[in-house]
Image (cartoon, coloured by chain):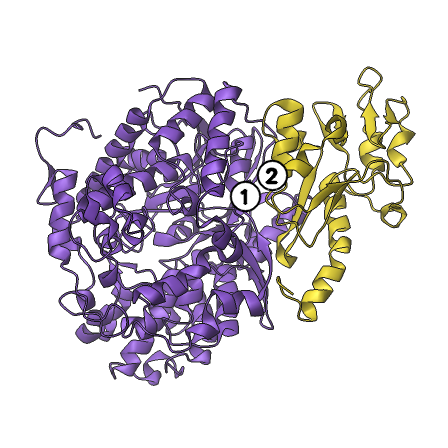
Chain colours: A yellow, B purple
């Protein structure tokens, strides 16, 4: 699953561009399954895509349109989806987007994720089949996907900001 | 000409009416659209801070596409600082979002009677009350709008207190610290009581000829990654220029009194990175990501770029880099142009040093070189027009009028726009660029970088003079500046980052034509793009002549004329600016700087 090292992410959004070009032959962050949350006031940038959490709340889809693939990725059966947006609400970190009445979830590009390939700082990596990240701590937050991503990134960035406070600089 | 018409959103702030139109026919995008709109629609002599001025914000034909660093918007209006054509570009993420919302240009006319902001949500456009945002700085404004509209990914272009208070060098900023900084576009926005533009877009940018377009993208990427400055720019961004300029002997230490700064090692790129930079930052879709985030005991924020770094250290004689970084962060939040603000402060310090003013003339603020009090207090006073700040908010040219003739002799501005942080005498292409370009004292119209390379083959290939590869040569500088200006105008039209397209010589007219044709699916040639730029360059000159520009305005500040660089590696260098300007006029076909000579290929301007 896609993981982003917040210490390396510079917030360029090349991953969003690559994702939307791969999946829709056009540039549109709204169509990207990976979204960069940029907390400009505290200097944090982090790309957020499905991390393959151990809880998998999106699979509670009432139409059973979503299922886990062999690599741990979430796959959509578009014929079953009725755009109820339960999955979008269920994802605690805003990794399920919605556009043109369809959920957008990372599918690992079928095995060779484009975002990992284009990331200029190698902040992104892919661990297939990982299911060891719990997002339970984020489950009670209600908000838009963007707000959920921002909250998640703020929490992920706490150790990094603490290191700045202690004097760590870019080369240290 | 086969150019596309952009979608133009017409916002009448007086009557609160919004219409949709098309951007000008002969423009490519960005600055070309804006300059044509202003030339066609703005009545000569319009008060820059009155309701009749027109403020244009434009993206361009490649903005928000897969092409690297197509990230800028250009803001244009009649400048309240110069009285001539004003424009400035900002990088970051605002322009791509505007494009994704389906809009290429916004033209603001009239003025609101209370504070408003424009809210663009794809096709839905509303003028909304912004009375709760008045008085907020740029960071507060941006965060408040993101919270109000419940979208932390919202893109916002805003003004700060400086713009609200009509400081003549106020900026429009997006992403908290990416500024359209020059010529006071933020003051024009403030005069219209327009606090911000918030935008969210979800429409895809899809190339009509994907194969061709992606080929251009790959070629551009390869040119960038293969450039000798790729790695240093990634590491230091523009801040590395400080050491380069020191080596060339053109540092503006103590407000151009010396080319040598003894504490250079305390304030240069290496010191900044070692002590204050915590990470790299990027604009939209850029593999160079040359920006940096700072974290200091004063504050934190994105930047500084070279200009802010140098303005608040070397130029003011200040060896305390952390202080300078703190000032840079504060200036960004207040919404002031760091170049003009630094120039105002450094010029005041020199006036005090020369005994032309005393601390009592400036509210008792200590104006000795490097004064911590001056650097910390003056930006806030200027932005709020409090005390001496009210006069300094007018810019150095107007402020000098109050302090008298000797103070006027010390200013470093052209046409009222304050100069960058380098001595124009020792980099003659840049010196000429500052003297003649359409917006006044400014290095960034285009970048005559070739004069710093020593690459005679490159100089010959680009402009026909081998000598143009050397910064101290006079020969070929007219041709070099003409070429650099056109390339800069192309970048300002395509809205590509000029640090890449111009400074890294990565985009020429041929590549731009392939990218344009590939994205839009219509055949546009390099020659057509060049002709469009030539045409708009002429229109911009006519705009300025119409506003009263005289050929004698095309010069450098008096302090650089006939006086050699006093010390350092370029000691003794003088610049014959009159001769260089004549050469430039000849290249432009401008008879005495005024008329286009007959036989020119562009008789249809306007």
Q: Is residue B257 above or below residue B589?
A: below
Please, what secondary structure does the residue beneath circle 1 have?
loop
Distance, label 1 to label 2, CA atoms, is 8 Å
User: Is residue B159 at least partly visible in the picture?
Assistant: no
Would you say residue B21 is visible in this rendering?
yes
- In the rendered view of the protein, which quadrant contains the N terminus of chain B? top left
Viewer-side residue, B214 vs B223 = B223
Query: Closer to us: mark 1 or mark 2?
Result: 1
Residue B458's spot in the image, x, y percent?
29, 42
Residue at 56% across / 28% down in the picture? B123
| Discs 1, 2: same chain | no
Numbered badge on residue B132: none
Residue B101's quadrant in the figure? top right
Q: Nearer the viewer, residue B172 or B287?
A: B287
Picture quarter with the C terminus of chain B:
top left
**Where B145 falls versus B515 (above or below)?**
below
The residue carrying mark 1 is B287
Element class at badge 2: helix
Number of marks:
2
Which residue, given by chain and number where applicable, does mark 2 sit on? Answer: A14
Q: From the viewer's perspective, tell me whether residue B168 is left or right of residue B195.
A: left
**Spot occupied by residue B602 in the image (x, y as percentages of width and height):** 18, 28
Q: Which residue is drawn at 82% across and 25% down?
A: A75
- Please tell me whether residue A23 is drawn above or below residue B141 in the rendered image: above
Closer-to-camera residue (B36/B212): B212
Tell me, yes or no, whether the two marked residues, 1 and 2, touch with CB atoms within 8 Å: yes
Q: Residue furthest top?
A: A79
Q: Crowdedness of circle 2 by 10 Å Cα count: few (<14), some, many (20+)?
A: many
* Residue B545 image offset from top left, x and y in percent: 17, 44
Circle 1 residues within 10 Å: few <14, some 14–19, many ≥20: many
Chain letter for mark 2, please: A
Q: Which chain carries label 1?
A: B
């Amino acid at each position: 699953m896609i993981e982003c090292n917040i210490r390396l992410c510079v917030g360029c959004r090349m991953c969003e561009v690559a994702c939307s070009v791969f999946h829709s032959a056009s540039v549109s962050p709204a169509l990207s399954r990976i979204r960069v949350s940029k907390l400009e006031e505290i200097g944090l940038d982090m790309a957020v895509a499905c991390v393959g959490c151990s809880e998998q709340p999106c699979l509670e889809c009432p139409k059973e349109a979503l299922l886990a693939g062999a690599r741990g990725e979430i796959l959509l059966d578009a014929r079953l989806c009725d755009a109820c947006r339960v999955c979008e609400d269920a994802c605690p970190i805003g990794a399920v987007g919605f556009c043109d009445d369809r959920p957008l979830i990372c599918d690992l590009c079928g095995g060779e994720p484009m975002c990992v390939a284009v990331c200029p700082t190698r902040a992104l990596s892919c661990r297939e089949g990982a299911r060891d990240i719990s997002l339970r701590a984020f489950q009670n937050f209600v908000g838009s996907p963007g707000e959920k991503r921002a909250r998640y990134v703020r929490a992920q960035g706490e150790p990094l900001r603490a290191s700045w406070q202690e004097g760590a600089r870019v080369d240290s | 000409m086969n150019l596309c018409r952009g979608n133009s959103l017409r916002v009448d702030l007086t009557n609160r009416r919004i219409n949709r139109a098309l951007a000008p026919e002969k423009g490519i995008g960005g600055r070309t659209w804006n300059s044509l709109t202003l030339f066609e629609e703005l009545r000569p002599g319009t008060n820059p801070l009155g309701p009749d001025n027109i403020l244009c914000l434009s993206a361009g034909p490649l903005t928000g596409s897969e092409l690297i660093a197509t990230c800028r918007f250009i803001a244009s209006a009649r400048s309240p600082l110069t009285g001539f054509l004003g424009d400035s570009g900002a990088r970051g993420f605002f322009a791509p979002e505007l494009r994704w919302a389906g809009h290429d240009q916004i033209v603001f006319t009239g003025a609101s009677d209370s504070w408003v902001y424009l809210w663009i949500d794809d096709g839905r456009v509303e003028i909304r009350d912004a009375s709760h945002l008045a008085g907020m700085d740029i960071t507060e404004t941006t965060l408040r709008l993101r919270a109000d509209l419940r979208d932390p990914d919202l893109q916002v272009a805003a003004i700060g207190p400086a713009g609200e208070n009509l400081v003549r060098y106020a900026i429009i900023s997006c992403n908290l610290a990416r500024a359209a900084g020059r010529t006071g576009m933020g003051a024009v926005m403030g005069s219209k009581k327009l606090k911000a533009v918030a935008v969210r877009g979800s429409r895809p940018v899809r190339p009509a000829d994907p194969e061709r377009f992606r080929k251009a993208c790959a070629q551009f990427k390869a040119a960038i990654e293969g450039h000798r400055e790729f790695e240093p720019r990634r590491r230091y961004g523009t801040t590395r220029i400080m050491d380069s300029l020191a080596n060339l002997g053109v540092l503006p230490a103590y407000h151009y009194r010396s080319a040598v700064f003894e504490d250079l090692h305390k304030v240069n790129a290496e010191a900044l990175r070692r002590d204050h930079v915590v990470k790299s930052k990027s604009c939209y879709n850029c593999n160079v990501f040359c920006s940096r985030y700072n974290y200091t005991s004063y504050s934190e924020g994105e930047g500084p770029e070279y200009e802010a770094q140098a303005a608040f250290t070397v130029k003011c004689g200040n060896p305390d880099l952390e202080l300078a970084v703190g000032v840079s962060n504060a200036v960004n939040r207040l919404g002031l142009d760091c170049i003009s603000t630094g120039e105002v402060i450094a010029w005041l310090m020199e006036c005090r040093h020369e005994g032309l003013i005393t601390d009592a003339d400036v509210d008792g603020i200590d104006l000795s070189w490097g004064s911590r009090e001056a650097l910390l207090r003056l930006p806030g006073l200027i932005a709020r027009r409090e005390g001496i700040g009210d006069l300094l908010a007018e810019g150095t040219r107007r402020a000098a009028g109050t302090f008298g003739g000797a103070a006027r002799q010390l200013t470093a501005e052209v046409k009222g726009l304050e100069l960058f942080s380098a001595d124009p005498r020792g980099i003659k292409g840049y010196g000429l660029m500052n003297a003649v370009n359409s917006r006044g004292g400014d290095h960034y119209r285009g970048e005559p970088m070739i004069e710093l390379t020593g690459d005679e083959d490159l100089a010959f290939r680009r402009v026909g003079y081998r000598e143009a590869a050397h910064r101290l040569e006079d020969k070929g500088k007219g041709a070099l500046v003409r070429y650099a200006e056109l390339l800069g105008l192309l970048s300002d039209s395509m809205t590509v980052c000029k640090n890449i397209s111009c400074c890294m010589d990565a985009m020429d007219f041929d590549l731009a034509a392939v990218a344009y044709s590939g994205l839009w699916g219509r055949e546009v040639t390099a020659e057509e793009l060049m002709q469009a730029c030539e045409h708009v360059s002429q229109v911009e000159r006519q705009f300025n002549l119409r506003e009263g520009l005289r050929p004698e305005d095309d010069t450098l500040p008096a302090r650089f004329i006939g006086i050699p660089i006093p010390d350092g590696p370029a000691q003794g260098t003088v610049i014959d600016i009159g001769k260089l300007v004549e050469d430039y006029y000849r290249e432009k076909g401008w008879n005495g700087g005024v008329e286009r000579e007959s036989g020119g290929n562009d008789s249809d301007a306007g």
